[in-house]
Image (cartoon, coloured by chain):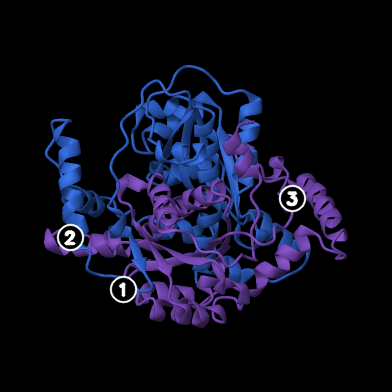
Chain colours: A purple, B blue
Amino acid sequence: MNETIQLLLNHVSVRKFKDQKLTKEQIDLLLKSAQAASSASHEQAYSIIEVTDPEIRKQLVEPCGGQEWTTQGHYFVFCGDFYRHQKLAKKYDTDIQDSLDSIDTLVKGVVDATLAAQNFIIAAESMGLGICVIGGVRDGIETVDKLLQLPDHVYPVFGLIVGYPDERNDSKPRLPQNAIYHQNTYETNKEEALKEYDEIIRAYYKKRNKDRTWSKSTTEAFSKYPRLYMKKYLQRKGWAKK
Amino acid sequence: MNETIQLLLNHVSVRKFKDQKLTKEQIDLLLKSAQAASSASHEQAYSIIEVTDPEIRKQLVEPCGGQEWTTQGHYFVFCGDFYRHQKLAKKYDTDIQDSLDSIDTLVKGVVDATLAAQNFIIAAESMGLGICVIGGVRDGIETVDKLLQLPDHVYPVFGLIVGYPDERNDSKPRLPQNAIYHQNTYETNKEEALKEYDEIIRAYYKKRNKDRTWSKSTTEAFSKYPRLYMKKYLQRKGWAKK
């Protein structure tokens, strides 16, 4: 197993960081790594906003999931971004309205931002840094939108905290390979793999004095935060109208 | 610069592969690497379908962008997947309908599939393999849906061809860092960076006897394929209804 795969397999989310800042050179290299990822038709439909202002960072905490430790390390927000494309369309007098309106364009923006982000994450971890993805940015989307002054066609997909880890958790077991892997056609009967996984997760949490399975806890968590405000927000900002 | 970052920066899309298959061990390691990526609330809302049947692969070519070479190497389809979650919800008699219906759940599925895919890609490249992302899967989404027998709540985000490269292109220059990077608030005035980039891309294509800038060619390409059938497809399959 090579060094890079070892690194990928060692990934854990970090939620406690040292009070040590990254250098400009490090951030440049993370951005360069992010940009090296594939993007749909070379559209490069994403932007990365670093929040360096401590005041803004404080104001993001509560609306974005209330995780106090998100003021630590560095904070980057990965956005799907067709702002520059719509501006260019005006310049070239090209009609891109259907493309801007299409829900497929939302998918494109999310894909481009996420491919770039995962490269950024791998590069950071290869430097000995730790990261945590903050999906909570979509809980506080109106606050994020306002504080970061996002124009139309810029959609904040998630935040990313990056810094020197002060504490590392154990890696949480993943679903058995058989549960997520299919050949040729989608196999709907994966009950056995999920049962097997529930026992693995039960053992994992037992060590942490909790009684929990993946099936039940994920189902309950998933039911709770449907983020039904999202459609209105997206459409107001020019996404997924059609 | 460490080995992993060097690998990320060396990424190019490969569109010609040798007639050499991956071993089961290699595929296992790629899947394991994919699964090691972060996922929203540990929901692991994705599936990976490998298309090994040559007949199905042939039938995917035309509808998915008509790229003949996509019958080479190995073919994986990365899907956002809440099929297992909705099945579990029935088992536990938990109401997750709002969550299934929410457009945010589409975003979650696309993010989870894409984080996993980028890890898969990096792992493949670290083994000396080449890859190409096939967004064209969304051109042929009805065919993909039918051939892979996708149930509701499984959304094919993109395909991925993986194999031993027989030909490697040069890396295509990316947007200047300043065009995609912002601090604290979104900076709408990036015209200078785009102008600079157009000259870089013009020089890149001049060597290939083409006269092309990014701004104009991307705008034109973006206008052409709005995929307006996507909303209907998604909603029929239980996504983004609210």
- Tell me if mark 2 has few (under 14), some (14-19) or many (20+) residues whose alpha carbon lies within 10 angstroms of its own: few
Q: Which residue is mark 1?
A: A151
- Tell me if mark 3 has few (under 14), some (14-19) or many (20+) residues whose alpha carbon lies within 10 angstroms of its own: few
The residues tagged by marks 1 and 3 sit, at their Cα atoms, a distance apart of 39 Å
Q: Which residue is mark 3?
A: A173
Question: Residue drawn at (39%, 44%), measured in percent from left and top?
Answer: A38
Secondary structure under the numbered disc 1 in the rendered image: loop
- Horizontal and vertical percent for residue A59? 50, 83
Q: Which mark is residue B40?
A: none
Rendered position, A66 above or below A18: below
Secondary structure under the numbered disc 2 in the rendered image: helix
Residue B83 makes an appearance in the image: yes
- Closest to the camera, between mark 3 and mark 2, is 2
Determine the chain carrying the residue at label 2. B
- Closest to the camera, between mark 1 and mark 2, is 2
Determine the chain carrying the residue at label 3. A
Residue B160 vs residue A168: left or right? left
Secondary structure under the numbered disc 3 in the rendered image: loop
Q: Which residue is mark 2?
A: B192
